Amino acid sequence: MPTPSMEDYIELIYNLMETKGYVRVSDIAESLEVYPSSVTKMVQKLDKDDYLNYEKYRGFTLTAKGKKIGERLVYRHELLEQFLELIGVDKENIYQDVEGIEHHLSWNSIDRIGDVVEYFKNDIDRIEELKAVQKRDE
C-alpha cells in the first residue's frame, strides 16, 4: 500500500494525466510546492514499487496498478468533498478538511461514507431534513 505522500503524488499524476495528457516533474513540483529533485526521488520510488514507468529524461506514465490506485484516490477525494458539502461544511473549509482527513480513513470508512452520501442523494427530502436540524441547532 502506498504511503500518504505516495498517494498525494499518484493522485496528482493521475489528475494531470487526465487533464493534460502528460505530466512533467515541474508540474508536480509546482503543485506540491516541493523541489524538482524531491519529485524525481519520489518518481523513482513509485517506479520501483510499480506504480509508474519512469525513463530518465523521457518522462513517465502510470502503470495499470498506478492508474487503478489513482482512480480510487480521486474517488475518495471527490466523495469526501461531497460528504462534507452534504453535511453543511462551509465551502471555504472543504478542500483543506479533505486534505487533512483523506489519508487517515480506512477504505471501509470511505465505503460507508459513500453509502451515507448515496442515502441522502437518493431523496432530496432527507437533505432538507438535515438542513432543518442544522438550522435549529445554530
Image: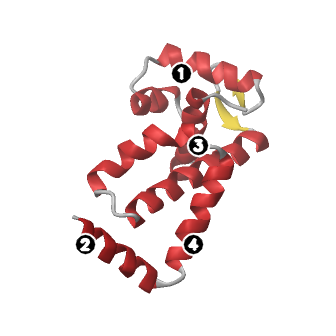
> Residue 86, which numbered label?
none
State the image coordinates of residue 90 (x, y, percent, origin top left).
28, 57
Measured in 3D between alpha carbons, the distance from the residue under mark 4 to the one under mark 3, in whole angstroms, is 18 Å
Q: Amino acid at mark 4?
A: Glu
Within 10 Å of disc 2 (Cα), the crowding (few <14, some 14-19, many 20+) is few
- In this rendering, the answer to whether 87 lies above or below 59 is below
Residue named by callout 4: 118
Q: Write the residue at 45% across / 80% down.
A: 126
Helix, strand or loop at label 1? It is: helix
State which tag comes first along the sequence, 4 or 3.
3
Measured in 3D between alpha carbons, the distance from the residue under mark 4 to the one under mark 1, in whole angstroms, is 37 Å
Q: Write the residue at 72% across / 25% down.
A: 47
Q: Are marks 4 and 2 in contact (CB under 8 Å)?
A: no
State the image coordinates of residue 93 (x, y, percent, origin top left).
31, 49
State which tag comes first along the sequence, 2 or 3.
3
State the image coordinates of residue 13 (x, y, percent, origin top left).
57, 39
State which tag comes first along the sequence, 3 or 1.
1
